[in-house]
Structure formats: C-alpha cells, structure tokens
Amino acid sequence: MDKKVEVVVIGAGITGLITTFLLQEKGIDVVLLEKTDRVGGQLHTINDESFLFESGPNTGVVSNIEVLELFRKLNDECTLQIAQQEAKVRLIWKNGLFRPLPNGLSSAISTNLFSWYDKINILFEPFRKRGNDPLESVASLVKRRLGKSYLNYAVDPFVSGIYAGDPNRLVTRFALPKLYRLEHEYGSFIRGAMKRRKALAEEKEQGISKDVFSVKGGFNQLVEALRKRISNDAIITSAGNSIVEPTLDGWSTSLSASGDKIYSQYVITTVPAYALPDLLPFVEEEEMKPIASLHYAPVIQIGVGIKDGSRVPLAFGGLIPSVEKEKLLGILFNSSCYSDRAPRGAASLSFFLGGVQHADLLNYSDNELYELVKEAMHTMLKYPKDTEPYKFHIFRHSKAIPQYEADSEERLNTVDKLQERYKGLIIAGGLRDGIGLADRIKQATKLANLLSR
Ligand SMILES: Cc1cc2nc3c(=O)[nH]c(=O)nc-3n(C[C@H](O)[C@H](O)[C@H](O)COP(=O)(O)OP(=O)(O)OC[C@H]3O[C@@H](n4cnc5c(N)ncnc54)[C@H](O)[C@@H]3O)c2cc1C
C-alpha cells in the first residue's frame, strides 16, 4: 500500500536506527527501510553458552557528547559499559613480544618500541615546519613530524586497528582530522596538545574522554533498545533493493519486495557507498562514480573462547605493526575489558585479519584460519602448542571499513553537489563524517537536529 511521510531513512544500521529514533522523538513522521530481514547492520552480537562475541564492532570511544546523550535517553533499555581500567593498556608486537605502548613520560623514555634517535628528535617537533599538502598521507605526516619508528610502532598499528588500512594511502585530513588540525591550527602536535589541555579538561567534565565503551550484553542490546523505541509501523525490514526517484514535490521510494511506494519530502541514505548506484538510479553513472568507487577494506574477525583465560594479558588488546610481517592485524582481549564477555576464569578474544594490506586472507579456508589462530595463541599469548580454542566463530566481511584515501575530496564534493541539486536528498552513512561508532552517533544526531529545525 502506498504511503506518505515526511522522511524516509534507508539502511537500518546504527546510523539509520538512531536517525529514525531521534526524528520520531521530535515528532517527525518517518519510515526506516532495511533491505535485509534484520536491523543493526554491522552491529551483531552472538551468544554462545556464556561467551559473547561481536561480528562487527566491539567498542566505540566516548569521544563526543552525542554518545553520552544517546545512552542517557536509552538508559531504561540498555546500559553503557565503560571498559575496565586495564583496557587503557595497549600492547604492540615487536620482535616476538607484546610490549606496552607508553602512557607517560618515563615509559616514553624507557620503551624499546621507538628508536633513541626518534625519542630525542621528538623534542624538536614543535619547531618543525608546518606541512602544506592537504592530501598528505598519514604515513608521510607522521614520518615528517615524529620519525619512522613512531610511524611503524605507534601510528601504523593504530591505523590498522581502526581502519584496517594502509597509512601510506589514508589521507590525514579525512582519516584522522583531529591529528591534521593539531598541525594546521597550532603548527605542532605537541604545541597543539598543550594548548588543547583546557578544552580537554572541560570535555572531561562533561564525560567526554578516550575511554572505550560497549553495551552490557553486547551491541545487540543497543540495536534492540533502538528498535523498541521506534514505533513498529515505522520500520520495514526485508524491503529488498529499493529505488528512489525525485517527484515534482519531493521523493518516491519504491520497495522492490512489495511493490509499494512511499512518498516523502526528505530521503536520507545511510547505506554503504557501493549500494548507491542501484538505490539512486536517476544519478548518471559517471557522476556517481566518485562516491560508488569508495574502497572498503576487507576484515575477518574471529571470535575465540578459551576455557583457561589466565594467560590473556589484562589489556585492551595487542596490535601488530605491518613491519613485523605477521598475518594477524591484532587481537582484542574482550574479557579483559568487559566482565560479561566470558564465564569466570575463561576468556573471549577477537582475532583480526585481512585489511587493505592482507586482502588475500579473505580466501583462507575455515581450517586454515583455525590453524592460524591456534598458532597465534601459542606464539603471541604463550598457550601450549596443543591448546584448542573452546569456541570459534568466523565473521568474514568482504567490504568492512571505508578507506578515506586521496579520492575523498572528490567524493565529498560530489555528495555536496548532489544534495544541492536534489533538494531533500541527504547522502549520509560511513562514506563521510567518520567511520567509528561515535562518528555514526554524531552524524545521526546532527541529521535529526537539521530536519527538525
Ligand atoms: C569487523 C568490523 C569491526 C569494526 N570495529 C569497530 C570498532 O571497534 N569501533 C568502531 O567505532 N567501529 C567499528 N567498526 C565500524 C562500525 O561498525 C561502523 O562504522 C558502523 O557500524 C556503521 O554503521 P552504519 O549504520 O553507518 O552502516 P551499516 O551498519 O553498514 O548499515 C547499513 C545498512 O544498510 C542496509 N542496506 C544496504 N543497502 C540497502 C538498500 N539498498 N536498501 C535498504 N537497506 C540497505 C544494510 O543491510 C545495513 O543494515 C567496525 C566495522 C566492522 C565491519
């Protein structure tokens, strides 16, 4: 049956769910369309006995006020879970051992992650010239300001932990905008960090921090809380491949599964970039190319349950720099961060493989992945060679994380141009404004505020 609403939101991942929830809260008539039969998109928790595994994200960062506001609103249905203190420790793999990333002056001096040359040279960072290439890669910026060992053993593993990407290809201005601004607004990372101390203290008072969060019981609880708060008739799942077309006074969205049409004043897309050509066929192929060609890194996440968790370090996880030439990108120690991830004494871990630099691993068979994880449990976590994982869940994502590379400028300009030309069309989602959960929550909040004005 055809229908008329003010807003159609397409894609029921976290961005679409929060946008819809907040729009409804503001009294706006909205419908959320999801192609598949479940809502949540990349958020998906799997419970196996008393072990809890995530197929997608395990944590977000409490990096903006919108995260806190959302959880305040959903307080009755789901509980924000801040990771335990131990999670502040990050380990980096170097020469056959996990070593803690320094978190203070004395550990920064004593660590053997970085070379003495770079440690001394960092004192001159505030006096180094400001870069002038707006498309400078993360690798080039970090090498220029901090030195090669900081790139190899701090920034490269950090970037692979977030983007599963290549720091030589990610452009700082788009991929790590805060880092870019430190240099461009203050002339130096160190000077910028000192000048921002007051602002950081103010943010801390509001609850904004670098702390990582999950949700008690896993991210499915957040999805479920949002689903419950949105009225039933506003969510249409199994909608199939919808088609959006401009009309004389707004938009028409046809649902391929039912043949129904929904007319609206606004359409907000939150689907991945590669889904847009089919969804918005009125945009010429050539014009859509800069958006649709956005490159996504493949990622395999393997949820592993171990009965004896005593050898798992009390830390957030261990990251593996690409110079170490290992197949793994890193291991998250989920049960060291959140007490509800595994039975007492046991451990729940996530092993990450693939990424831009090891895309071929996506073709590994389940057996090969099992052997690889078993080997890493032995060499990296020091379990006896014959220790078998008690639980083993493989989650393959062929298009996991958007890479904000040199083509980002053209992509964002194209988005702006289309939104300007087609009034009422909003192209959102992870193809812009950041790829992390906190970015998604912030974008959804901004969209809801914009449309309610
Ligand atoms: C393995 C993995 C690990 C991650 N780890 C972290 C982490 O630790 N921390 C962090 O902050 N972030 C992490 N992320 C990123 C984070 O998960 C995403 O940024 C976020 O979940 C994206 O949400 P979204 O709603 O924008 O998109 P999605 O979750 O992709 O949702 C888009 C939705 O649109 C639907 N859709 C597609 N086409 C159509 C169509 N034509 N019509 C209707 N619906 C359609 C899809 O089915 C999907 O439900 C990770 C991602 C992955 C894959």
Image (cartoon, helix red, strand yellow):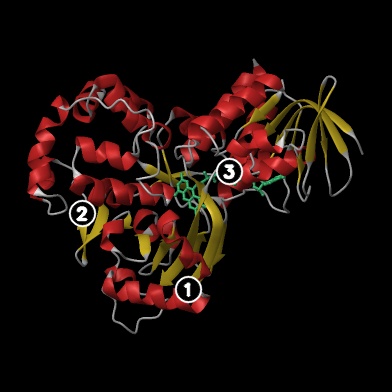
Residue 450 image position (x, y, % from top left): 61, 20
Q: Residue at x 43, y 62 (%)?
A: 353
Q: Is residue 97 left or right of residue 291?
A: left
- Image mark for residue 100: 2
Q: Earlier in the sequence, mark 2 or mark 3?
A: 2
Residue 76 image position (x, y, % from top left): 57, 39
Whether label 3 touches label 1, CB < 8 Å: no
Q: Is residue 168 left or right of residue 143?
A: right
Mark 1 or 2, which is nearer the eye? 2
Q: Residues within 10 Å of mark 1 (few under 14, many from 20)?
A: some
Occupied quadrant, residue 73: top right
Q: Is residue 88 visible?
A: yes
Q: Residues within 10 Å of mark 3 (few under 14, many from 20)?
A: few
Between the residue at mark 2 and the residue at mark 3, the CA separation in whole angstroms equals: 38 Å
Q: Is residue 176 left or right of residue 46?
A: left
Image quadrant in which the C terminus is located: top right
Q: Residue at x 35, y 59 (%)?
A: 330
Q: Is the residue 87 above or below the residue 414 in the image?
A: below
Q: Earlier in the sequence, mark 3 or mark 1?
A: 3
The front one of 145 and 438 is 145
Give the residue pinned by disc 3: 293
Q: Amino acid at mark 1?
A: Lys
The front one of 433 and 346 is 433
Residue 99 image position (x, y, % from top left): 20, 58
Which element carries disc 3, helix, strand or loop? loop
The front one of 351 and 278 is 278
Which element carries disc 2, helix, strand or loop? strand
Give the residue pinned by disc 1: 391
Residue 421 image position (x, y, % from top left): 69, 20
Q: Amino acid at mark 2?
A: Pro
Image quadrant in which the N terminus is located: top right
Between the residue at mark 1 and the residue at mark 2, the CA separation in whole angstroms equals: 27 Å
